[in-house]
Image (cartoon, rainbow, N blue to C red):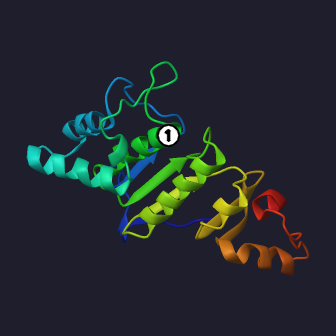
Amino acid sequence: MTAGQVLINGKPNTPQLVKKSIAHVRQNDRLLPHLTVRETLSFVAKLRLPTHFTQAQRDKRVDDVISELRLRQCAHTRVGNDYVRGVSGGERRRVSIAVQLLWNPGILILDEPTSGLDSFTAHNLVITLSRLAKGNRLILLSVHQPRSDIFQLFDLVVLLSSGSAVYFGAAQDMVPYFTTLGYPCPRYCNPSDFYG
């Protein structure tokens, strides 16, 4: 059993601090299909950003997030869904992330962000998340058996088996760790498949 205290920036967590610091991106996108990407973000900015923000500050924040998630080319395209033609699946997922980044949380948690995406789009999405993590932000994501090219983009890994952590540490140290325990990963084999 593990015990301890959860701190956020050195402070004991409170419901208010959690709400202010952590954003969650659901596995299934929940967006209004008839709004464009920019309209979606502007609408959310009016609802989520502090009331003391001016319209110019809201617009700037929307522009910053559109730029940060590389959504400029589709900013005036409808979001769409299964029934309404709109942006691609990868762009829709980036819009869902953008909605949460509008209020600039320090911690972003994503539930299966690559599910339903083709391999190229999933890889590009994780590259985007990796770039976001290089800023002053913590990115946590759950992924079931990621491809090897996606696995290589991870900094830290928690590998779970039957609900218990069997490895926690640097992604690059996972194979050597299991090798010292007598479980070497075969050459050309994806470590997340072999150890998962």
Q: Amino acid at mark 1?
A: Arg
Kindly identify which residue carries mark 1.
26
**Compared with residue 44, is residue 143 higher up or lower down, i.e. above or below?**
below
**Compared with residue 118, is residue 196 higher up or lower down, i.e. above or below?**
below
Residue sitting at x 65%, y 73%: 169
Q: Residue 57's x, y, as percent?
A: 13, 51
In this image, 4 relative to 15: left or right? right
Residue sitting at x 60%, y 41%: 117
- Quadrant where the N terminus is found in the figure: bottom right
In this image, 161 relative to 143: left or right? right
In this image, 70 relative to 54: left or right? right
- Quadrant where the C terminus is found in the figure: bottom right
Dot 1 crowding, Cα within 10 Å, few <14, some 14–19, many 20+ = some
Q: Nearer the viewer, residue 48 or 115?
A: 115
Q: Residue 111's x, y, as percent?
A: 55, 45
Label 1: element kind: loop
Q: Quadrant of residue 27?
A: top right
Residue sitting at x 21%, y 45%: 49
Asked if residue 52 can be seen in this view, the reply is no
Q: Nearer the viewer, residue 34 or 20?
A: 34
Residue lying farthest to the front in this orientation: 73
Residue sitting at x 42%, y 41%: 96
**Compared with residue 66, is residue 166 higher up or lower down, i.e. above or below?**
below
Q: Residue 189's x, y, as percent?
A: 84, 64
Q: Residue 132's x, y, as percent?
A: 42, 62
